[in-house]
Every structure is written in structure tokens, then in C-alpha cells.
């Protein structure tokens, strides 16, 4: 029998079963099928759980008729024992039911988290340039929970439907009139009760979206707390939060009003049902068509049947919400990686020259090349091309959240517009990935090499790398294949002594999530150390020392060349301290390589180069210099 | 590695948890090369050798927590018992660990939560009374129905036995009318009860969350600067969510359910004391188990909540760092970490599941068995003439009616427990003591003077060793030095974020840390990288330091940093909403907003931490003017990473190992032929 956490292999193992993301409903059905036999077992247990409530009143009726009223203690005893057996049986199944339901719920929840994790890992940098992180995370959290809730309520709803039909059959077999009453009233009650659900759900939707805005505001306050406490603004943003909190309260009260109406109409309708049952039943007894015991058991059923009717309504609500959640999940999970496997994968010969078609830059193998650009974006884009990363274009994110004020048709239009935008984006990415890439290594275009191979041989350390929580050792040596010598060498080259020193416990010292608690410079050197330790054939570093002080930068510069001796290294920088140690420097102007040579030579010969490097240029704005000039 | 990877990929395989790390160590570290000398300083090299493979990688979920593969039923049960105890211990350890202020912000105790909620409820006395009253009336109306049904059964039986069919029919008619009336009354009071409990829940919740955010906004400056925000983020998202669920829904429902339970018991006894005995006795027995459960559940739920935060944190890192994962080939590594988190969470879930099962085992019996006993007692009573059929009917209906509210009560108390657990974490934020007390003295001038400054983040590890610095008004001082030399710490002391361990930083003769924050902000500002754009209007984003500034002042500040033009072109000008999910700004514009804030704050001294400074090279060109506007006419301390910054300053302080090694103008220091001169030559050659 399935248990939690479920094994999920989709997206990361080739050929493993992937979820059905053709439509939200198809996805929900796939989730149900994930439970395998467990779902049916849960149903069975739920049915057993229902038995005492379904046959209990009937047994009581028999006991009254054949035992108590007839004055037959043996018959009474017999029915009491039967009732006791059924009751204990049902009570024991309660535990089983709870266990199975928790399993189903958690299989759905953990399964969703695992799917999202695997999808994120499969898509890599492609996902974060398309979908806001918050939306990816909420699929794993709240939407996953919603799927769990759906498993629970559908099990309950199906079992109670069965119970309802059994009760109707029991009643029908005794009294046709009352049986018909039971059969007709349940659908009638559900139909009469549902019109109120729509405004209630609408307000609940408003409350949810206002509440998620409220949560964003709280997260925002925490995120900018240093500024709020350092510069001020507590009253403004505390006030904004309080304002939104009151708006959430108002919508909550409005939703509550409809909920109260739903509940009170429920009381009215189910009460009416009991009144009808009682009136009809008593008349039948008075006319001798029904025994007292049968009346008592019908009254018992009257109270019991309220429960299935409520469950049906609850199911309808949760189903609607789950479809919404499923749509969000599908929006994330249906994204495909744009890459295609080359028909005849070529080998990557990293001992050959690397040529970037767009800039015309040629990177010679085995030496330390540095790239200087007046516009740092150009050199960052070159780094992306060298590593076969899709460009990080701004405004590419397509959110799935639509504004609260859009309703009905407008909301639908907006939603389909976004779906189209997402589709168009995926299409663009695929186009880009399918064409020749424009960077050749030894004459072989990167698109002809398996992407995994490119990733393995060429490491691009970009400007916003992630530092993961864990021990320092796992940060530097995540795959556990370094010797201590190698690690120490990387630590030394990256001049990260103080990072090592700052963490109590050395290599076993714990880094916080995202490297919080380290300074910007420390984080940068940790990342550099990690990149050096990975020891790729081709290492591309983008502004690796921009947050590092001049003293330390000088130290790193003097050690980098020796560390990477004989291997291809490309550094995007404009710092003279680093450039000084380059074997070769390439100057980019307008994204095109215009000069190539040694630092000292370029400094002497190229005015353009000099203007970028020496006076800092754009890459190194000296804040105080302009003031100094002004005051002189 | 590939073998380990493939096991990891299948996830959750017990042996995969520690495999890669362990094999890595075994393969490599023993192959020490005798001729190899560590490039690190001796102390570090020793520490490195000591810690490299010292830790035994403990699996996320120990084997003892996995059920035996094959065993008899008895063995299985005793193994389950052992696992349950182990999980209980893990929950206790987790809670003890979280309660420890070392790992994050403090956590309040339960008594404080009860006082807090009690206080909030007492502010809404009228509502509380109407919730109780409306529910009591609704429940009473509902409870009269079974009673009337019982009487109807008796009268009908009597009429039928006496052959009075017409009387029986008339009885049915009038009883139906009365019950219908009761149903209408019950329905009306149900509406009132639900409505008032919603209003109560929503208003208590709104007050509670606003109080929490208020507490966050009062956190001490030094705490905010040095602590990680992860814990706080979890608290304002997950814990506020759990508290909401509890206050909005569980608390009112718990009140309703307890009222209904009490009234049902009263109704039972009044119907027939004898027939109410089974329910009362069994319920009392069940209360022992309920108490046992309530004693353990909070820790279980706290642990559970913690594991979900962890899952969320790991996934956030994975998603945000997707490119890093891809670049470094960490897919399997991240996968394993995520799956381990889920394994750990699964164990926490198993613990609370078993706790609930133990509770349900007792509860289910206690609330379903009375029906059987009532039938038995009723049969005896009917034979002996103590009980009528009507009383038996009513008693059976009541035992059924008791189940629902009691189940709801336990179910909601369960949620209230979770809510309380989360609320302890939320109220913990309010228990952080302030780090400073404002004195009465006000500065007499703008001179910033630091004397004998020492500071330690860890006791006994001073990072500054007695620094003296005088800043003259309007001066530009650059601080340079290798990382770890204490530059940034010095910056924090000079801007009044931390108080020094010894010595003092004064402005106009008054200690910075004894100034009220409002005042401090107009004296010195620390400028760091965080050009955070808040969710709020452009105006909200600028007025920070001088709340209550007029729109003209805001416009003036924006004009000073060349931002007014584009702000006015925004769809709603100053009222345009910015921040995540709203109007997006380019990094350059975000930085301009950040600068405009400081213009409006108008401190006479600015400490510029360039390590993580506002100046992103990509947008620098557009910002030069804005930056000039901010710095002109102010005293500037620039913690410089770029030598040009230092070159242009009036004075340069070279800080090495927590001491000022060199101090003077650029020319003076170059002549001194010291540390600075060496660097300068490396830069310019």
C-alpha cells in the first residue's frame, strides 16, 4: 500500500512517468491515481466507518419492536449485542480511516512538493526567468494542501453517498412514502442550498486574495526591515499593513455573512426535512402502517442524513477550489525545457579555441583571459553565451495571479492572455535553443553538444549566484569528491580565510540559508572558492571580486593565474588589480571585441581601454571624485 | 559518484541519505600527500585538518524510525511504540531547540498567549456575550426538537393503544407545527450566532496580526542588522497563517461546540438522569485521554510546522538558485536535500497522527457506545416502568447529538493548539528587549567623535581594538582595509546601529545610542545596498525618514535625484503603487528612490558601506548626479573597496586587524610607503 512520502521520479529520471498536465481536471485525476490502491482502501474503510450510522437506527428500531415493546428480553439482548458489535467495529475503523486519510493527504501534499522541486531542477535557469518564484512556491505549499483536502473530502463524499443510498433503500423497503421523501429531499436540499454558495465563494475568494496581499506586505516589511528601522517609515508601512488588514477583515466578515446564511438555511432545510419525516411518520404510526420502532429508527435517520447533505456541499466547494489550484500547478508543471538533444552529439574539445560569433571574441585555450567592457551587461551577456544560458531579458516573467478587480469575462480574458504570453515565451525559448548557438569550441557549435556535457565542462559563475544552507564543506564540495588539499587550495586562492574563520566549526560550520550572515564580500569569495574547487575545463567568472576590497582583490588576482594554470579561464572585470595578471585581455565596445592584448600594452595603446580601466569608467564610479572636483 | 547519484534519484532510499558524502570522505582524505604543505596559515590549516571530515553525516531520518520489514504483529506493535517514543523525543528536542533564543528570535510561553487572547476578547465583551447567547439559544431550540419527538412518540403510542386515531393525527399536526416553529427559531439564532462569531474572530485576528507587525517594526536596530530574516519571514507567513486559521475559525467554533456540549448534557439529564449516565460516565473517562493528548500535541504541531518551513526554505533556495544548481551540477544534491526534508516532515506527521489515533481510539468508543448502553438501560427501564419509549427515543437522539459537537470541540481544540503554538512564536517577537534607552540630552553640533572603540560579536573575540576617530564637519573620510579587518563594524558603530563594547561614539557630545531613533536618523545614516522598494505608493516609499512630509517636499527630494520626471510620467504619479506585484522599477530607478529617501531624511553625516553599496556599476552612469545631490554638504564616511574612492577623499584610514594602521591624505599615505602605497602602485601600474 502506498505510504507517504511518495516516490516521485518525474522530470529528473528520463522515461519516468510524468503528471498529466493537459488540463487541470486531468491533473487532479492523475493525483488521485497516484494513491493507487490506497484510494480504494480508504473508500472501503470509510464505508465500514459509515456502517454503524447506517444500520444503527434500524437495529434500534428492531430492538424496540421485537424486544422492548414485545417484552422479550432475549430479543432485546440479541439486538443490543448486534448494535454493540457494529458500534465497536465502526469505532475501530475510525482509526484506520484517519490513518488512510492522513496518508492520502500527505501523498498529495508531499507529492506536489516533490513534483515542483523536480520541475525546477529540470528547467534550471529557464524557470526563474519565466515564472515568479512566489507562484512556484505556492504550488508546492497551499495548492498541494488543497489537493490533500480534495482527497479527504472525496473519500468522505463517496462513502456518504453510499450510506445515503443504503439508508434510502432501508426506508424504502419499510415505507414507500417515507422512502420517497428521503430520496427526494437530499437532492432538493442540495439544490436549494447551493445558490447561496456562489456569493459566499466569491467573498471567500476576495478574502483570500486580499489576505495574500496582506502576507506579501508583511514579508515586504520583514524584507526591508533594515531600512524601516535604519531610516524610518514604521508608521507609514505599519499603517499600510493595518489598512490592508482591515480590508481583509471586511471581506472576511462579508464572506462570513454568507456562510452564516448558508448555515442557517441549512438548519432550516434539514429541520424542515425532519419535520416532514416526523409528521409523515407519526401519521403512518397512527394509521397503523408503521410500528413505533420503525418511527424511532426513521427519526434517527432524519438526523443522520443531514451529514451527507453537508458533505456533498463541502465537496462541491473544495472541488472548485482544487480546480483553481490544479490550474496553477499545471501552469508550472507543464513547462518544458526548451533544449533539444542534438542528433549526433559532438564532443567538446576544451583544448581548442572558443569563438563567440556575436562579439567576435576569440578565447585561447589554457590561459587566463579577461574581458573588459564599458557596459558590464555586454560582458555578462558574453558569459551567458559561453555557458549556453538563455539571456536574462527583463520583464519576461509572466505571473498567473490576476488582479482582484477583474471578474467574470474580463478575468477569463486576462487569464487566457497570460497563458498565451507564456506559450509565446516558451516558443521563443525553443526557437533560440534549436538554432545554432553562435559559440564554437574548436569549430563545433555548442548546440551540437549535449547540454549536460557543456554544463560539465564549462562553468559560468554569474553575478547572482546562490549560496545554499549547509556546512561550509558542503558549500564548497557539494558532491563530496574533493580532497582536503584541493579545498584548501581553493580557499587560499579565493582568499576566503575570513569566511572559514567566521564560522565556528571550520568546514563543519553551518551556513545560513542563502548565505545570510556573511557579508557581500564573504559571500562572493565563498562563491569563487566553490567555482575554483569545481575545477572545470573552462571557467567563466563574471565580476568575481566586485564586492571585495582592494587588499583582498589584489591577493586573489595574484593567485588566480597559478591556480588555473593550463586551463581556460575567462574573467569579466574592469579592475586593474585583476587585469594586471591576465595572460590576455579583450576589450568589448558596443558588445564587439575591438582590441586584444596584454593589459600593459592595451593601456599604452588604446585610449578606449584606458578610459574604461584607469579612471574606473562606468564600471567603477568613484562617488567622491565628482564631489572632489566640484569643490576644487 | 554516479552510483550514489542514481540511488539518490530514486529518492527516499534509506541508504542514500548519507552515501555520497561518506564515500567522498573515504576515497579521498586518507590519501594524504606527505610532501604537500597547506597554503593556509598554521592555525587555519590545523582547524581545516581537524574539521574536514570530523562530522559523521547523520542521516536525516535514523533507521530506528523505519518500520521493520518483516515481523510478527506483537513485534510490530512494540516497534511502533518505540518509534512513537523516539518521535516524541525528537519533537521535544526540536521545540527545546527552537525555544532557544540562540537559533533565532525568542518564543513566548503559553501563559502569555492565553493572556494576550484573553485581553483581546475582553475588549470585545459585547460580541463575546452575543456569540455565547445566540449560540446558547440556537442550541436550545435545536435540543428541544428530540425532546418533542420523544413526547410525540409517547403520545402517539398512547393514542394508538387507546384507538384514538384522530387524536394521534391531530397530535402529529400540532407537534409538526411546534417543531417547525423551533426550526425557524433555531435557524434565525444560528445566523446570529455565526455572524457574531465571524465578526468576533475577524476582529480579534485583525488586532492580533496588527499587533505582531507593530512588534516587528519595533525590533531593536542592532537585532535587525545582525539577525537573519529567515526566521522572521517564516513567522509572518506560516505562523500568521496558522494563527489566522485558529482565531478566525477554530476559536469561535470551539466556543460554539463547548456551549452545545454543555447544553446537550443538561438536556440529557433533564430527559432522564438514568439514561444520561452512559454518556456522562464514558465522556468523563475519555477526558483523561483528551488531557494526555492536549499535553503532547502542541510540541508535535510545533515540530510539524518547523519541518514545513524547512521544506519551504530548501525549495526557495532551489528555485531561486536554479541557475547555480544547473551550473554546478547540483541537481541530485538538491533533490536529496528536498527529499530528506520531506522525510523528516513525514516523521513529524507520523507522530501527530499516532497521537490523534490514540485519542480517537478512546473518543470513538466513548461516544458511540452510549447508544448501545442507552438501549440496554432503556429496555430494562421500560420493563420496570422507569422509562417511556419517548424517553428512550430522546435519549438515543441526544447521544447521537452529543457526538458532533464534542468531535468538533476536540477537532477545534486541536487547531487552537496549533494556533497557540504559532502565536507563541509570534508573541515572542514582542519579547525582544530594546537595545537602547533614549536619554534626554540632545546634540549641540554635528561633530562625530569615536573614542577607544572596541566591539565583539562573540564574547572574547574583539574585532575592533580601541579605535579613535574624529570627523570634522563636511569631511570625506575613506576607510580601506582587507576584509575582516572590521571596517563594516566600524561603520555600524559610527552610525549608531551597535553600541561599542568600550569607548563611545558621540555626535555633538551625545552618545549615538542614547538618542531617540527619530533623532538619530536625522544625524547619521548608514547607506547600504538595500535599495528595497516597498509595496506602497511612490510617496510612501520616499517619506520614510520624515513621515508627514508634504507632497512638495517629496517632489523636491525626487527632483534632487533626477527622479521627478519619470515619477510624474507614471500612471498615477506619486500615488502609483510600487513593489512586488505592482509597478516594476529598473534597478537604477529603485536606487534613485532609495537616494531620495536619504535626501528627505537629511542627515548631516552619511556612512557609505560600499561593499554592498548603492552603486551598481550597471546603472552608475545615471546615478552620479543623484549621488552627488545626496552627498554634497554632508560629512561622508566611505567604507571604500575601490581605490579611487579613497584617492578622492580628504583623509584615508587604513584599518588592519581592528586597528587604524595608517591615517592621512592620499599624498601623505603614498609618501609613507606603507600598506596603502603598495596597493596604490598595484592599482595604477
Image (tube, rainbow, N blue to C red):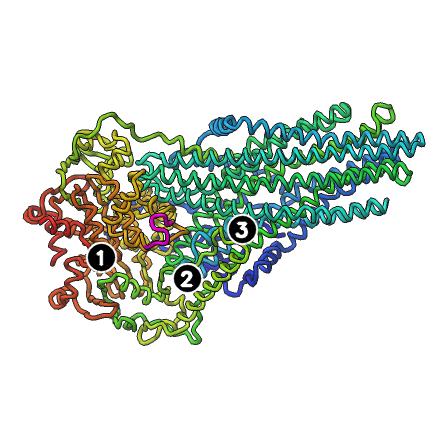
Q: Residue furthest right?
A: B163
Q: Residues within 10 Å of mark 2 (few under 14, many from 20)?
A: many
Q: Which mark is residue A126?
A: 2
Residue A85 seen in the figure: no
Whole-percent x, y for residue A76 in the image: 86, 33
Residue sitting nearer the eye, A14 or B514: B514
Q: Residues within 10 Å of mark 3 (few under 14, many from 20)?
A: many
Q: Residue at x 58, y 45 (%)?
A: B67
The chain letter for the residue carrying disc 3 is A
Whole-percent x, y for residue A485 in the image: 29, 54
Q: How many marks?
A: 3
Front position among marks 1 and 2: 1
Q: CA distance from mark 1 to mark 2?
A: 30 Å
Q: Is residue B571 magenta?
A: yes
Residue B107 seen in the figure: yes
Q: Quadrant of residue B380?
A: top right
Residue sitting nearer the eye, B415 or A542: B415
Highlighted magenta segment, given as a residue range: B569-576
Residue B37, compared with residue B463, is above or below; it is: below
Same chain for the residues at labels 3 and 1, yes or no? no
Q: Which mark is residue A150?
A: none
* Residue picked out by circle 3: A144
* Residue picked out by circle 1: B621
The chain letter for the residue carrying disc 2 is A
Q: Residue at x 85, y 37 (%)?
A: A282
Amino acid at each position: 500500500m502506498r505510504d507517504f512520502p511518495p516516490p516521485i521520479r518525474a522530470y529528473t529520471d528520463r522515461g519516468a512517468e510524468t503528471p498529466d498536465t493537459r488540463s487541470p481536471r486531468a491533473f487532479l485525476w492523475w493525483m488521485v491515481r497516484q494513491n493507487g490502491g490506497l484510494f480504494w482502501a480508504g473508500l472501503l474503510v470509510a464505508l465500514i466507518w459509515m456502517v454503524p450510522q447506517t444500520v444503527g437506527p434500524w437495529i434500534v428500531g428492531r430492538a424496540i419492536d421485537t424486544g422492548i415493546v414485545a417484552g422479550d428480553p432475549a430479543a432485546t439482548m440479541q439486538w443490543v449485542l448486534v448494535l454493540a458489535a457494529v458500534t465497536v467495529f465502526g469505532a475501530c475503523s475510525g482509526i484506520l480511516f484517519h490513518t488512510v486519510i492522513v496518508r492520502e493527504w500527505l501523498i498529495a501534499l508531499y507529492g506536489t512538493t516533490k513534483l515542483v522541486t523536480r520541475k525546477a531542477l529540470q528547467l534550471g535557469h529557464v524557470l526563474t526567468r519565466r515564472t515568479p518564484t512566489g507562484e512556484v512556491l505556492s504550488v508546492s505549499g497551499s495548492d498541494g494542501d488543497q489537493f490533500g483536502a480534495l482527497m479527504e473530502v472525496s473519500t468522505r463524499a463517496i462513502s456518504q453517498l453510499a450510506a445515503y443510498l443504503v439508508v434510502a433503500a432501508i426506508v424504502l423497503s419499510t415505507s414507500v412514502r417515507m422512502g420517497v421523501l428521503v430520496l427526494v429531499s437530499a437532492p432538493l436540499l442540495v439544490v436549494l442550498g447551493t445558490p447561496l454558495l456562489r456569493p459566499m465563494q466569491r467573498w471567500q475568494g476576495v478574502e483570500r486574495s486580499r489576505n495574500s496581499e496582506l502576507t506579501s506586505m508583511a514579508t515586504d516589511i520583514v524584507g526591508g526591515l533594515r531600512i524601516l528601522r535604519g531610516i524610518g517609515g514604521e508608521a507609514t508601512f505599519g499603517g499600510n499593513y493595518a489598512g490592508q488588514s482591515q480590508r481583509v477583515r471586511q471581506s472576511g466578515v462579508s464572506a462570513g455573512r454568507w456562510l452564516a446564511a448558508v448555515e442557517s438555511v441549512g438548519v432550516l432545510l434539514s429541520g424542515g426535512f425532519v419535520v416532514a419525516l416526523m409528521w409523515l411518520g407519526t401519521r403512518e404510526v397512527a394509521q397503523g402502517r408503521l410500528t413505533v420502532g420503525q418511527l424511532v429508527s426513521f427519526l434517527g435517520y432524519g438526523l443522520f442524513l443531514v451529514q451527507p447533505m453537508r458533505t456533498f456541499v463541502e465537496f462541491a466547494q473544495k472541488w472548485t477550489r482544487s480546480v483553481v489550484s490544479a490550474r496553477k500547478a499545471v501552469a508550472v508543471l507543464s513547462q518544458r525545457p526548451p533544449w533539444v538533444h542534438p542528433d549526433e552529439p559532438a564532443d567538446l574539445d576544451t583544448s581548442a579555441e572558443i569563438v563567440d560569433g556575436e562579439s567576435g571574441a576569440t578565447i585561447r585555450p589554457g590561459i587566463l583571459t579577461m574581458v573588459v567592457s564599458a557596459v558590464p551587461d555586454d560582458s555578462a551577456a558574453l558569459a551567458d553565451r559561453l555557458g549556453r544560458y538563455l539571456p536574462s531579458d527583463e520583464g519576461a516573467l509572466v505571473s498567473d495571479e490576476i488582479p482582484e478587480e477583474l471578474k467574470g469575462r474580463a478575468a477569463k480574458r486576462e487569464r487566457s492572455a497570460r497563458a498565451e504570453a507564456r506559450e509565446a515565451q516558451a516558443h521563443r525559448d525553443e526557437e533560440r535553443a534549436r538554432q545554432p548557438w553562435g559559440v564554437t569550441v574548436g569549430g563545433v557549435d555548442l548546440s551540437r553538444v549535449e547540454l549536460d556535457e557543456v554544463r560539465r565542462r564549462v562553468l559560468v559563475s554569474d553575478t547572482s549566484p546562490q549560496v545554499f544552507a549547509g556546512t561550509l564543506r558542503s558549500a564548497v564540495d557539494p558532491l563530496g569528491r574533493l580532497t582536503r588539499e584541493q579545498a584548501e587550495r581553493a580557499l587560499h586562492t579565493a582568499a576566503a580565510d575570513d569566511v572559514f574563520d567566521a564560522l565556528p566549526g571550520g568546514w563543519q560550520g553551518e551556513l545560513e540559508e542563502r548565505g545570510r550572515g556573511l557579508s557581500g564580500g564573504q559571500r562572493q569569495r565563498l562563491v569563487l572558492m566553490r567555482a575554483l574547487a569545481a575545477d572545470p575545463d573552462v571557467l567563466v567568472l563574471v565580476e568575481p571580486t566586485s564586492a571585495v576590497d582592494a587588499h583582498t582583490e589584489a591577493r586573489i588576482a595574484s593567485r588566480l593565474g597559478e591556480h588555473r594554470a593550463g586551463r581556460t579561464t575567462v574573467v569579466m572585470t574592469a579592475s586593474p588589480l585583476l587585469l594586471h595578471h591576465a595572460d590576455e585581455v579583450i576589450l568589448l565596445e558596443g558588445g564587439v571585441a575591438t582590441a586584444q592584448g596584454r593589459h600593459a600594452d592595451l593601456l599604452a595603446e588604446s585610449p578606449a581601454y584606458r578610459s574604461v580601466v584607469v579612471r574606473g569608467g562606468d564600471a567603477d564610479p568613484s562617488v567622491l571624485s565628482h564631489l572632489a572636483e566640484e569643490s576644487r | 559518484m554516479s552510483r550514489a547519484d542514481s540511488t539518490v534519484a530514486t529518492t527516499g532510499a534509506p541508504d542514500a541519505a548519507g552515501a555520497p558524502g561518506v564515500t567522498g570522505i573515504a576515497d579521498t582524505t586518507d590519501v594524504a600527500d606527505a610532501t604537500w604543505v597547506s597554503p593556509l596559515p598554521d592555525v587555519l590549516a590545523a582547524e581545516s585538518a581537524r574539521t574536514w571530515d570530523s562530522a559523521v553525516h547523520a542521516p536525516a531520518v535514523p533507521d530506528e524510525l523505519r518500520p521493520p520489514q518483516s515481523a510478527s504483529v506483537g513485534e510490530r506493535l512494540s516497534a511502533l511504540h518505540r518509534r512513537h517514543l523516539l518521535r516524541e523525543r525528537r519533537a521535544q528536542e526540536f521545540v527545546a531547540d527552537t525555544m532557544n533564543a540562540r537559533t533565532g528570535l525568542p518564543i513566548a510561553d503559553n501563559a502569555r498567549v492565553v493572556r494576550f487572547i484573553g485581553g483581546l476578547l475582553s475588549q470585545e465583551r459585547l460580541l463575546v456575550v452575543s456569540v455565547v447567547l445566540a449560540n446558547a439559544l440556537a442550541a436550545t431550540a435545536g435540543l428541544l426538537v428530540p425532546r418533542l419527538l420523544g413526547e410525540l412518540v409517547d403520545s402517539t403510542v398512547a393514542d394508538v393503544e387507546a384507538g384514538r386515531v384522530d387524536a394521534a393525527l391531530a397530535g402529529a399536526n400540532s407537534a409538526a407545527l411546534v417543531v417547525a416553529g423551533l426550526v425557524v427559531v433555531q435557524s434565525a439564532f444560528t445566523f446570529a450566532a455565526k455572524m457574531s462569531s465571524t465578526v468576533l474572530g475577524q476582529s480579534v485576528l485583525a488586532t492580533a496580526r496588527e499587533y505582531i507587525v507593530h512588534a516587528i517594526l519595533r525590533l531593536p536596530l542592532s537585532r535587525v542588522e545582525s539577525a537573519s530574516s529567515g526566521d522572521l519571514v517564516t513567522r509572518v507567513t506560516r505562523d500568521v497563517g496558522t494563527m489566522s486559521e485558529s482565531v478566525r475559525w477554530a476559536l469561535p467554533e470551539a466556543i460554539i461546540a463547548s456551549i452545545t456540549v454543555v447544553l446537550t448534557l443538561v438536556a440529557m439529564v433533564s430527559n432522564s438522569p438514568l439514561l444520561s449516565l452512559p454518556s456522562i460516565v464514558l465522556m468523563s473517562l475519555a477526558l483523561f485521554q483528551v488531557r494526555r493528548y492536549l499535553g503532547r500535541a502542541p510540541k508535535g504541531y510545533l515540530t510539524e510546522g518547523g519541518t514545513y518551513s524547512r521544506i519551504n526554505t530548501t525549495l526557495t533556495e532551489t528555485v531561486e538558485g536554479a541557475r547555480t544548481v544547473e551550473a554546478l551540477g547540483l541537481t541530485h544534491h538538491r533533490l536529496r536535500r528536498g527529499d530528506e526534508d520531506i522525510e523528516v516532515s513525514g516523521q513529524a506527521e507520523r507522530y501527530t497522527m499516532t497521537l490523534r489515533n490514540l485519542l480517537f481510539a478512546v473518543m470513538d468508543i466513548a461516544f458511540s457506545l452510549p447508544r448501545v448502553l442507552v438501549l440496554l438501560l432503556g429496555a430494562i427501564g421500560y420493563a420496570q416502568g422507569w422509562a417511556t419509549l419517548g424517553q428512550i427515543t430522546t435519549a438515543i437522539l441526544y447521544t447521537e447529538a452529543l457526538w458532533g459537537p464534542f468531535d468538533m470541540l476536540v477537532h477545534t481544540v486541536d487547531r487552537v493548539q496549533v494556533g497557540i503554538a504559532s502565536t507563541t512564536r509570534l508573541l515572542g517577537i514582542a519579547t525582544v528587549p530594546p537595545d537602547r534607552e533614549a536619554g534626554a540630552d540632545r546634540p549641540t553640533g554635528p561633530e562625530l567623535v569615536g573614542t577607544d572603540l572596541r566591539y565583539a560579536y562573540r564574547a572574547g573575540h574583539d574585532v575592533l581594538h580601541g579605535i579613535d576617530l574624529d570627523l570634522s564637519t563636511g569631511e570625506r573620510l575613506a576607510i580601506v582595509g582587507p576584509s575582516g579587518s572590521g571596517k563594516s563594524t566600524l561603520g555600524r558603530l559610527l552610525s549608531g546601529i551597535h553600541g561599542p563594547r568600550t569607548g563611545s561614539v558621540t555626535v555633538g557630545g551625545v552618545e549615538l545610542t542614547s538618542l531617540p531613533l527619530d533623532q538619530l536618523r536625522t544625524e547619521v545614516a548608514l547607506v547600504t545596498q538595500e535599495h528595497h522598494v516597498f509595496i506602497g505608493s511612490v510617496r510612501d516609499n520616499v517619506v520614510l525618514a520624515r513621515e508627514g512630509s508634504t507632497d512638495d517636499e517629496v517632489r523636491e527630494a525626487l527632483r534632487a535625484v533626477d527622479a521627478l520626471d519619470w515619477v510624474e510620467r507614471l500612471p498615477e504619479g506619486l500615488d502609483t503603487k510600487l513593489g512586488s506585484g505592482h509597478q516594476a522599477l529598473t534597478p537604477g530607478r529603485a536606487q534613485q528612490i532609495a537616494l531620495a529617501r536619504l535626501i528627505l531624511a537629511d542627515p548631516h553625516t552619511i556612512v557609505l558601506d560600499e561593499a554592498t553599496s548603492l552603486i551598481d556599476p550597471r546603472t552608475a552612469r545615471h546615478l552620479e548626479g543623484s549621488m552627488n545631490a545626496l552627498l554634497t554638504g554632508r560629512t561622508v564616511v566611505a567604507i571604500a573597496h575601490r581605490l579611487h574612492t579613497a584617492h578622492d577623499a580628504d583623509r584615508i584610514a587604513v584599518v588592519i586587524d581592528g586597528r587604524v594602521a595608517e591615517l592621512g591624505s592620499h599624498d601623505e599615505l603614498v609618501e609613507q610607503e606603507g600598506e596603502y602605497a603598495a596597493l596604490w602602485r598595484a592599482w595604477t601600474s
